[in-house]
Image (cartoon, rainbow, N blue to C red):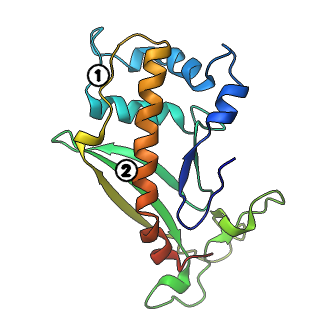
């Protein structure tokens, strides 16, 4: 099974997808079928940009939990965004602790590690502090990673089924490869650890 690491911000979990498939083929495919209304444009296949964006939305939480695409828990968010000129980007939101700031504010609360005894201690999720008797400065950085349109999968169908699932899985593999190629940017922001 894949694991998170310094070069792995996300991965596709094909083993879990197949073993938990209600249709015997793909759990992700079943979720795509449930959201078929989002995956076509007047019964025509979506553009590669729109398809990748919708397929990512379905493959991740909150629609799929656990997701077909697993996201490293120390990231606040990893989503797609489409610009006004129909270009796709991956948006990575990273919580930053005060030690990452040039000037640290005095007497202000910071992010705190999530209290989950089962969590992988190497990639701690951060959450707002429970204490609320003084101000908290919760700083995040947002990275936008452009995705070249020619790398995207062109969907072959507008109907849910094995062909759409195959196309969507290929689109997810490409996006995961792109985001992981930029893991060094997250590591530079966080100092490589929490």
Q: Is residue 98 above or below residue 173?
A: below
The x, y position of residue 123, in whole percent, is 66, 65
Q: Eyeballing the image, is 134 above or below 118?
A: below
Residue at the (45%, 38%) spot, across then down: 172
Q: CA distance from mark 2 to mark 1?
A: 19 Å
Q: Does label 2 or label 1 sit earlier along the sequence?
A: 1
**Mark sitting on residue 46:** 1
Contact between marks 2 and 1 (CB within 8 A): the answer is no
| Position of residue 179 in the picture relative to residue 44 (left or right) | right
Residue nearest the viewer, comparing 50 with 137: 50
Q: Circle 2 sits in a helix, a strand or a loop, which is it? A: strand
Which residue is at the front of the view, 27 or 75?
A: 27
| Residue where numbered disc 2 is placed | 90
Residue at (29% x, 27% y) in the render: 154
At horizontal 39% and vertical 20% (from top left) the residue drawn is 38
Q: Is residue 140 visible?
A: no
Asked where in the image residue 86 lies, by quadrant, the reply is top left
Q: Residue furthest left?
A: 85
């Amino acid at each position: 099974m894949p694991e998170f690491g310094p070069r792995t911000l996300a991965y596709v979990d094909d083993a879990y997808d197949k073993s938990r498939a209600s249709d015997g083929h793909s759990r992700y495919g079943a979720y795509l079928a449930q959201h078929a209304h989002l995956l076509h444009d007047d019964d025509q296949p979506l553009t590669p940009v729109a398809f990748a964006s919708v397929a990512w939305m379905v493959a991740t939480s909150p629609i799929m939990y656990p997701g077909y695409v697993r996201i490293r828990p120390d990231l606040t968010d990893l989503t797609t965004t489409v610009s006004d000129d129909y270009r796709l980007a991956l948006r990575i939101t990273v919580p930053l602790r005060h030690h990452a700031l040039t000037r640290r504010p005095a007497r202000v609360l910071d992010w705190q590690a999530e209290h989950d005894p089962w969590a992988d201690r190497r990639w701690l999720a951060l959450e707002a502090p429970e204490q609320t008797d003084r101000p908290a400065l919760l700083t995040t950085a947002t990275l936008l990673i452009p995705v070249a349109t020619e790398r995207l999968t062109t969907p072959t169908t507008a109907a849910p089924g094995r062909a759409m699932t195959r196309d969507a899985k290929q689109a997810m593999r490409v996006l995961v490869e792109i985001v992981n190629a930029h893991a060094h940017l997250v590591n530079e922001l966080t100092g490589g650890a929490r």
